[in-house]
Amino acid sequence: MKLQQVLSLTRKAIDDYHMIEEGDRIAVGISGGKDSLTLLYALHGLMRFYPKKFSIHAVTVDLGFQNLNLEGIEKICEELEIPYTIVKTDIGSIVFDDRKESNPCALCAKMRKGALNDAIKKAGCNKVAYAHHKDDVVETMMLSLVYEGRFHTFSPVTYLDRMDLTVIRPLIYMNEADVIGFINKNNITVVKSPCPADGHTKREYAHELLRDINLNAPGVKERMFTAIRSAHIDRW
């Protein structure tokens, strides 16, 4: 997928859900994976011509795993002239060594978001962009159905009143396959997650389940996404 196509889908989501206003300072959460790097390039591209002027600041929360190499991200941000902050933490050792959590993802996510939000506020940003794409939207809905018994997923825009911070998700119209295509076409090097739980989560189960269903009923993901948009879920 070409950058122009990424920009088109990103702008449509931003316009449809009024994600960006004049003067916004937007932090971009960067894990180093394909999704967050695609979002970084998309928002950087939109900055050049979007009618409402905004700025971006990349932020990575380093969980403390020894084999995490962020040099590639630093180089990208330097080339794009994007400010980049790395937040050093011991979250990895707390979750896996000290607490020995049987369900590490929940605690890790809570601590990681706390560290990210603190860094965002220190950087003077009023919004944070997450790199959730269309597959993430549908998979979250499936997780909610299976484990919570309700039809629900995260919203395109969420206001965190305790932090006075707005979360936006500009990639919700992009398929994961589109993201992969963009990364491959542009030879962008991604950072492999060093987390021991990577690939062994409930979300991975939902990912595989959706893939299996789509094999038997092609197009089911798009129909599920349409159902989400028309189901009157809060802020959709």
Image (cartoon, rainbow, N blue to C red):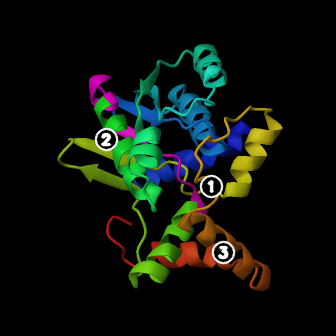
- Where is residue 35? Give x, y as percent: 61, 45
| Marks 2 and 3, how far apart at CA | 30 Å
**Residue at screen point 58% across, 45% down:** 195
Of badges 1 and 2, nearer the viewer stands 2
Residue 235 drawn in magenta: no
* Mark toward the start of the polypeptide (3 vs 1): 1
Number of other residues with Cα within 10 Å of mark 3, as a class: few under 14, some 14 to 19, many 20 or more: some
Q: Tell whether 43 sits left or right of 157.
A: right
* Residue 171 visible in the displayed image: yes
* Mark toward the start of the polypeptide (1 vs 2): 2
- Where is residue 215? Give x, y as percent: 79, 79
In the image shown, does 141 or 5 lie closer to the viewer?
141
| Marks 3 and 1, how far apart at CA | 16 Å
- Where is residue 115? Give x, y as percent: 34, 36
Please name the residue that numbered disc 2 is placed on: 114
* Residue 20 visible in the displayed image: no
Number of other residues with Cα within 10 Å of mark 2, as a class: few under 14, some 14 to 19, many 20 or more: some
Of badges 2 and 3, nearer the viewer stands 2
Of badges 3 and 1, nearer the viewer stands 3
Quadrant for residue 164, please give it: top left
Give the residues in magenta. 119-135
In the image shown, does 15 or 184 lie closer to the viewer?
184
Please name the residue that numbered disc 1 is placed on: 174
